[in-house]
Image (tube, rainbow, N blue to C red):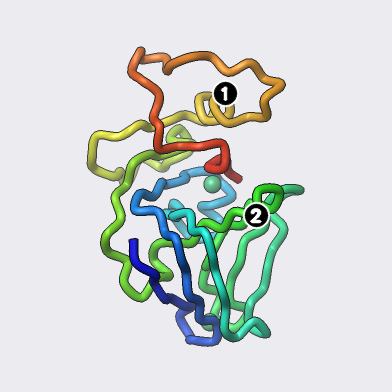
Amino acid sequence: MADKTGGCLCGGVRFSARGIETHHHACHCGMCRRWSGGPVLAAAVDGLTFDGVDNLARYESSDWAERGFCRNCGSSLFYHLKPQGLYMVCVGAFDDPTGFQLTSEIFIDHKPAGYAFAGDHPRLTEAETLARFAPSETPATSGRADGSSPDASLSQSDLQP
Ligand SMILES: [Zn+2]
Ligand SMILES: [Zn+2]
């Protein structure tokens, strides 16, 4: 989709994103839940530039990923998969958060029962998520347990946390 701008709640961090995917996924893992206060809805982008980098903090949530937020207001801004250099921007941080379609949910078995997203799309448990996106030494099983076809919209880079 067209380039989008966005930023944190206080305006201390502003960003401009290019090459934004139109689909996004929802991650219900415990790390995303604590980081954002709920599920993380994020879309991959090809390029991301920042204004206010002095306010931008990065938390290394694992050996391979970091999460960006504003050190002044705490807004969750992005998930950065370091080996691939891939940035996934929190959809809610965009000034215009429209135009995205939710195409998958991961770590669905960690979702609290009190809320649920509507729609017909793959919902992967932790085991299914890891089986599909774990490093390649783990033999990937073909297809999903329910026999439906693999979701082409997910890629290796969608692995969280
Ligand atoms: Zn801020
Ligand atoms: Zn997650």
The label shown at residue 86 is none
- 87 lies above or below 131: below
Q: Which residue lies at the image location 52% right of the left edge and 67% below the top edge? A: 76
Q: Secondary structure at mark 1?
A: helix
User: Would residue 122 be found to the left or right of residue 88 on screen?
Assistant: left
Tell which of 113 and 138 is nearer to you. 138
Tell which of 52 and 124 is nearer to you. 52
- 160 lies above or below 69: above
- 54 lies above or below 27: below
Quadrant in which the C terminus is drawn: top right
- 84 lies above or below 138: below
Q: Secondary structure at mark 2?
A: loop
- Of the numbered discs 1 and 2, the one sitting upstream in the chain is 2
* Residue to which mark 2 is pinned: 85
Q: Which residue lies at the image location 51% right of the left edge and 81% below the top edge? A: 14
* Residue to which mark 1 is pinned: 131
Estimate how packed mark 1 is, as few (under 14), some (14 to 19) or many (20 or more) residues with alpha carbons within 10 Å.
Answer: some
Q: Where's residue 110, x and y in %? A: 48, 38
